[in-house]
Structure formats: structure tokens, C-alpha cells
Image (spheres, rainbow, N blue to C red):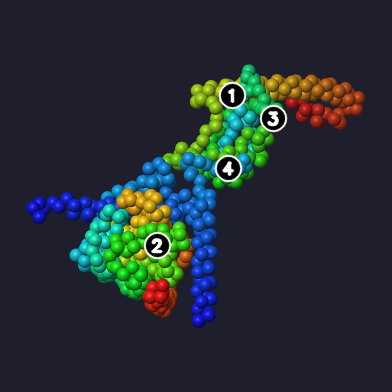
Amino acid sequence: MTTLLNIPLVIHLALPLTIILVYALVAIWGERKVAGFIQDRLGPMRVGGWHGWAQSIADLLKLIQKEDIIPANSSRFLFKFAPFMMFAASYAAFAVIPFSSGYIGSNINIGVFYLLAVTSVLTLSIIMAAWASNNKWSLLGGMRSAAQMVSYEIPTIATVLTVIVVSGSLNLMTVTEMQSGNDILGFLPNWFIFQNPFLIVAFVIFFISILAESHRVPFDLPESESELVAGYQTEYSGMRWAMFMLAEYADMLLLSLLGAVLFFGGWNSPFGDFMSGPLWGFFWFMLKGLLLVFVMMWIRWTLPRYRVDQLMHICWSILIPLSFINLILVALWELIF
Amino acid sequence: MLTVVKQGWSTFKSIFTGMGITIRHFFGPSVTLQYPDEKMELPENSRAKLYVNIDDCIGCFLCARACPVNCIDIETAPATADVDLGKTSTGNPKRFWLTRFDIDMAKCMYCDLCVHPCPTNCIYMVPDYEYSEFDRSNLIYSFSNLVPEQVADVKEKAEAEAEEKKRQREEMQKAKAEAARKKKEMEAKKEEERSEKDGKEKGRAPSKPENDGGE
């Protein structure tokens, strides 16, 4: 280590950040367009020419100019620190995501474990924001959020474990490499979702859990705007609020990408060797992730919100038993075939 | 166990039904009208703004009288004998200069009551709804096509003619009165002569009224 500025490290730091920032701008615009189209509207149309593509940029510029309001009776340090901690948590998790066959931030052997551990800091930062705001709506939202995230981490982990049983590795790069090739029934890609019928059930449970973990409708209780103003974000304004928004969208992408790695073959092309390579790999990977993000948005504008007790009922008495039974079934299937 | 499976099945079925509906709308056409760029064609009889075809107006004040909120302000001057204002497109002769025809659209309540009494159909609603203003006084629309000098000129002429007519009428009345007086005098004389004749014939009986009438 001769220089302080380590060029590969900077690139490793900057690449996922760039992807997240560009994705967040596109996704916020995309969410509004999806909402508009589903409701037979057009969504933002005026900023930037074609279909209002620059709307998020304009919103960002507006947020930068806004006053940074800190409530008088808040806990100042925690209040200021919480949004950055939240974004740091979801950003840190991107380190183990294999974006293409040629790029992974950190090729460690406990990839999935690290990812799940780091994202649980999100809960902590949400409680931090809620408590520091000194506002009843914030606190209620924060409590709901904590309960929800802690509960839904169990089925998420159980389903991830199901995939790990099949793959035998926690390293996401290895998991992806195991899904290369098109051998199932002669043409289907070797993705885990096609390898084992019980993994389809696992994917459904996983998808419901990540919806809840990233606070998406129908599990958006922590920030249910019709009841709690905006939950833990109520007292935040300007760029600090934007950090929450960014972290939330980053979390959505992270969990969708995790789903793409675990069930849909990560950066593998669906056509075998055709259109494969590091750059095509990145394209396929992002396409799969963004498709899952699109399904999340699609569900948002379809389903109504659950009640708190229903939310807990779904998690504790349906998803958790089902995911553990499924884990045993997958293990048996792997043992027999 | 069976009920759980059934419930689960119906849950997923309803979720996918809902998602099917939303995706159909996602690809379906949008109903949004990009307003300043594209505008909806309003129906012909929509009430948005009053318009007066001043060339057809005969200055009859029927619209101003019909208006419940008094938003129509008309002032006319009769046309002098030396000008012919022509006829309206409906064939009515025009006899007045319209020195003022102001409609205050800030007061107007779009009731359409002024439109129907008009004998020449010259006041009507037009589907133009984009006329908001920052100052309320800008909402007063003037439909008179006379410039202020013309207005002054026309008024002066009309007044002069009215004066002239008044004078003529007075003269005529005077002449009439004169003629009537002369006639009366003549008749009185005749009466006197006749009564004198009668007095000579009948003696003193009718002499009293004769004295009164004579003076």
C-alpha cells in the first residue's frame, strides 16, 4: 500500500453507487409512469421532452434546494445520522452482488450471509429515525416497520437457505456459475427455479417476504400515507428525506437482484452461450432485477394494504411454517434425485 | 388442511385476476388530455364567453333588460337623418349608433338569458374559455366598434338633430296653437254675431252670457 488513493478500490466503490443512483432516478420516474399507465393516465409528461424522462432530475434539484428542518425536540445527532446509516446499509450489501461474470465488489465465501446481516441494519436505522424524530406518527411507523422487518427476515432467510441447500455455497458468484448452461428438458436454462419444483414455492415465499422487507404495497404499513402521514419519514425534509427514498429504492433493487441471483441464474443468458459475456451478463442481470422491480410496482397498484394483525398472521402462521416445510422437502428432493 | 389449500388457491386466483386487470390497463389507452397542447372540442352550445356581433345589433336593450346581474351596459345614440346605418343580416333596419356595448364577464353568470330575447340573434355564447386575467377590470369586454371621436361626433349630431326636431316640434305646436286660437276667435265672432241677431229677435234674455263671452 504505497498510495492512499487505491484506484481499483475507488472503482469498486463507484460502480455500484453509480448503478444505484442511475437506477433510483429511473425507478422513481418509472414507478410514476407505471402508476399512471395502470390508472389510465400518462404520468409525468413535461420535463425533459420524451415522456417526462427528466422528472426525477428536476425533483432531485428541488430537494437539494429545500430547507433541512430538524425538529426542536428531536435527538439531533441520531436524527441527522439515521438516513445516512440507512443508505450505507443498503449500499454496503451491494458489495457481494455479482453484477456480471467479470465484476463483483467482494468475492467472499459468506456472501449471502453478509448480505442478510448488513441489511438488518436497515431496521436499526429506521427505529433510530423514528425515535429521534420525537413524533408519535414517526414512532408508530418505526415500531411497525421494526416488527415487520424482523418478522419477515425469517421467511426470507428460510427461503434463501432453501437455495443454499441446493447450491451448497454461500458465495453468490459460485451460486450464479452453478446455474450456467441450458440442460433442463433440453432447452430450459439451468436456473434454480427450473431445477426443483419446490423452489418455485420457495420463490413465491421469497417474493412475498421481500415485498414486506422493502415496505412495498401490500405491506407498506410503516409508511402507510393514509394513516401515518409518512411513518418514520414524517419529520424529514429535503436531502435527508431523499436519502431515505434512495435507500428504499436501493433496497428494492438489492432484494430483486438477490432474487435474480438465487432463482433466475443471475447474469446467465437465457439462451445459453448466445448473448453471453461480461457486458451481456450485466444486461441480463439488470433486466431480471428490473423485471422483479416492475412486478413489485405492478403489485403496488393492484392490491390494497393489509392490517397489522393480518401482516403478522401471514408471516408467523403461514409463511414461516410453509418455508420450513419447503426447506425439508427441497432437501429430500436433493437427497433422492 | 383442505380448506387451507382452497383458501390459498382462491387468494392467489384473486391476486392474479387483479394483476391481470391492472396489466390490461397498463397497456390500454390513456384518457389523459395534455391540456395546453391538446384541447377538448367543446360543444357548440357550451356557455363559456359572451360574444356580440355588433354589425347586427339594433340597440333594442332587450339583452340588458333580461340580464339578472346587470352585466350588460349599453348606450345608444339615434342615427341622424343624413346617415343610413343599413340593415342587419336578418333584415331589421338599424336606427341607432351603439356608442357603448360593454359586457362585464366577471359579473356574468352564464345563464344564457340574454341570448334568447335578441331579435337579430347577435348576442350569443362562444366556446372560448381561456380568458383569465390578473385584473378584474380586464374582464369588461367592449363590443362597440366606434372610436371615442366617432362616439363624440355621433352624439353631438344626434343631440343637434334632437334639438332641431324639438325646435321644429315646438314651432309646429306654436303654429298649431296659433291656428287653433285664430279659429276659435273666428268662431267666437260668428257666435257673437249670431247671438246679437238672436237678441234682437228674442229681447233681453240671452244678454248675460253674451257679455261674458264677449270679454
- Marks 4 and 3, how far apart at CA: 27 Å
Crowd band around label 3 with a 10 angstrom C-alpha radius: few (<14), some (14–19), many (20+): few
- Marks 2 and 1, how far apart at CA: 99 Å
N-terminal-most mark, 3 or 1: 3
Mark 3 belongs to which subunit?
Answer: B
- Which x, y percent locates residue A181? 38, 58
Mark 4 belongs to which subunit?
Answer: B
Q: Secondary structure at mark 1?
A: helix
- The amino acid pointed to by label 1 is Ala
Same chain? Circles 1 and 4: yes
- Marks 2 and 4, how far apart at CA: 57 Å
- The amino acid pointed to by label 4 is Leu
Q: Nearer the viewer, mark 4 or mark 3?
A: 4
**Left or right of A119: which side holds B177?**
right
- The amino acid pointed to by label 3 is Thr
Q: Are marks 2 and 4 in contact (CB under 8 Å)?
A: no
Q: Which residue is mark 4?
A: B42
Q: Are marks 2 and 3 in contact (CB under 8 Å)?
A: no
Classify residue B206 by image quadrant.
top right
**Left or right of B198: which side holds A53?**
left
Q: Nearer the viewer, mark 2 or mark 4?
A: 2
- Marks 3 and 1, how far apart at CA: 25 Å
Q: Which residue is mark 1?
A: B158
- Which of the labelled discs sits on residue B90, or is there none? 3
Crowd band around label 4 with a 10 angstrom C-alpha radius: few (<14), some (14–19), many (20+): few
N-terminal-most mark, 4 or 3: 4
Q: Which residue is mark 2?
A: A191
> Which residue shows up at 33% across the image and 68% down it?
A167
Q: Secondary structure at mark 2?
A: loop
Same chain? Circles 2 and 3: no
Classify residue A69 by image quadrant.
bottom left
